[in-house]
Amino acid sequence: MKGKLDSLKEPGMGRRPKKLIGTALLVFMVPFYALVVAALASSRLAETSQFVQIAFFAFFGLAWIVPAGAIIRWMAGPRSQSARR
């Protein structure tokens, strides 16, 4: 009887709880990150050149992908031995 019984014996957290936790982290992380970056930009970039502002928003506009990718990778978890074959 392989299947559900084997997954109950595996150590660690299952895929469903990981997806729930990861989704909650992403839902809260992205708006929080956006607010922090916007606050930082409004306090530090007001007197800078347009080039510096574009570079700042280009960098920080893409920087959220790194932690989001790590969370998504964690949510997916390692592939099981049977899926690798």
Image (spheres, rainbow, N blue to C red):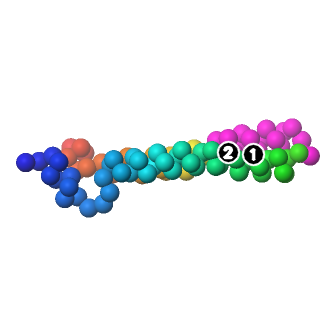
Single out the residue that lies furthest toward the left.
Answer: 1
Kind of element beneath mark 1: helix
| Residue 22 pos. (x, y %) | 45, 49
Q: Mark 2 highlights which residue?
A: 34
Image check: 57 left or right of 11? right
Q: Is residue 13 above or below residue 24?
A: below
Image side of residue 20 versus residue 50, left or right: left
SS for dot 2 = helix
User: Would residue 77 be seen by someone viewing this image from the given angle?
Assistant: no
Q: Which residues are magenta?
A: 47-63
Residue occupying image coordinates x 84% and y 39%: 51
User: What is the crowding at mark 1: few (fewer than 14 residues within 10 Å), some, or many (at least 20)?
Assistant: some
**Gap between marks 2 and 1, in whole Å?**
6 Å
From where the camera sits, is residue 22 visible? Answer: yes
Which is nearer the eye, 54 or 6? 6
State which quadrant residue 11 falls in: bottom left
Could you tell me which quadrant the C terminus lies in? top left
Check if residue 58 falls in the magenta segment.
yes
Q: Is residue 7 left or right of residue 69?
A: left
At x 83%, y 43%, the residue is 52
Q: Which residue is mark 1?
A: 38
Name the residue at 79% across, 47% down.
Answer: 41
Coordinates of residue 28 in the picture (x, y in percent): 56, 48
Q: Is residue 79 magenta?
A: no
Question: Contact, CB < 8 Å: mark 2 with mark 1?
Answer: yes
Query: Main structural element of the magenta stretch: helix, strand or loop?
Result: helix
- Of the residues shown, which amino acid type is indicated by label 2? Ala
Residue 47, numbered label:
none
